[in-house]
Image (cartoon, rainbow, N blue to C red):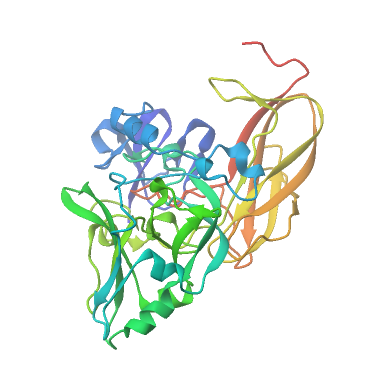
Amino acid sequence: MDRWTAGRGGTLCRVSTWAYTAHMLAGIACRLPGPKDTCMTADALVPAGTTAAADVTREELQLAVRNHGMPLETMRYDITPVGLHYLLIHYDIPRVDPARWALAVGGAVERPATCTLDDLRARDAVTRPVTMECAGNGRARLSPRALSQPWLHEAIGTGEWTGTLLWPLLEEAGLASDVVDIVFAGLDRGVEGGVEQCYERSLTPDQVRDEEVLLVYELNGAPLPPQHGFPLRLLVPGWYGMASVKWLGRITAATERFAGYQQARAYRYRADADDGGEPVTRIQVRSLMVPPGIPDFYTRQRYVRPGPVLLEGRAWSGAGSIDHVEVSDDGGERWEEAELDAPMGRHAWQGWRLRWQAQPGTHELLCRATDTAGNRQPLDHRWNLGGYAVNTVHRVPVVVTEHPPDA
């Protein structure tokens, strides 16, 4: 099946395969057209809901200033300080009175329940470091790109989350034998895709049990802040952040597949608007580098002085632990394996480091991770309509010089 992708010079090209060359420094994902490919102007063929324009729209800017990413230099912290953890809020932050709040558990269960925050805190508690990443992390580097939150690399964070396992609570409620989905409804409401809705997602009963899903009420040793879902949120370790519903108010056991907007229309890998697609689930293997040296204020160009330089970063995957991380200083021609820190936890990022001998000149530093399931960060990205799971290698251009410019 033919697909559309942006080529050089602002054209959109019909390509006969999914092979793309990701030119991340230029913010372009493209494939040079072959004999069976056709090109037309981008304005004529950009898929609905995307744009090939380099400029950020006013609507994207509104989202960018409302939500925020984690500055990459703060990957030096094992546990991300709460104010630096990435944040994506679909609608409004609800104001919740914890004294009046309660979690309703119902649907196809033998014993419906209502749990106060005190009830949940009285249950067996677990505290785990878990890395969370937005499914759209990286979409702003694509062209065409989805018109949504314009993430570059920074939609990540690792928190120390405290709560209680959900599965024992569902066992106590007594799931009916024909339950196929557990539906989670947040207290936030809005309009998306022309539909008024609360934010809702679902998991199968097996997923709730096997993924050790948590009902979380603390982050980094303190009650959840309002922006992170106070008083209670779901946490699905190893999955992209869309599954971890904030401001949780209701859990419903359903005997039919949940077909809400966030499950059936959003967060799916689709080639075009008519493609039903496959659901976005586990976090794809990824590594990022702490940008070395010092930045130019406006362009963020990095300047590094010659000599030994410690390159460091983090790597993570929802499909397994990290097997190894490699670093290149010549745009990917040659790779050197980095040293890995000890794992922090099953679903937490892992530190890596490499001593680099910086030589004067311009360099493109790259890092890529491979997990124990054999998944490796790709050099090229397989484009999808929503701009999900863009886990291509991290590229960091640096200028090595004794005298960084003053302006």
Q: In the visual, does 223 lie left or right of 384?
A: right
Residue 262: x %, y % from top left: 28, 57
Farthest front residue in view: 99
Front one among 312 and 39: 312
Q: Is residue 386 visible?
A: yes
Q: Residue at x 38, y 32 (%)?
A: 65
Q: In the visual, does 56 lie left or right of 218?
A: left
Q: Is residue 368 above or below residue 366?
A: below
Q: Is residue 8 above or below residue 403?
A: below
Q: How many marks?
A: 0
Q: Quadrant of the N terminus?
A: bottom left
Quadrant assignment, res 50: top left
Farthest top residue in view: 406
Front one among 387 and 246: 246
Q: Is residue 253 visible?
A: no
Q: Quadrant of the C terminus?
A: top right
Residue 211: x %, y % from top left: 48, 72
Q: Is residue 223 above or below residue 117?
A: above
Residue 223: x %, y % from top left: 47, 54
Quadrant assignment, res 344: bottom right
Residue 128: x %, y % from top left: 57, 63
Q: In the visual, does 181 lie left or right of 283?
A: left
Q: Residue at x 57, y 44 (%)?
A: 81
Q: Residue at x 31, y 45 (%)?
A: 93
Q: Residue at x 68, y 51 (%)?
A: 351
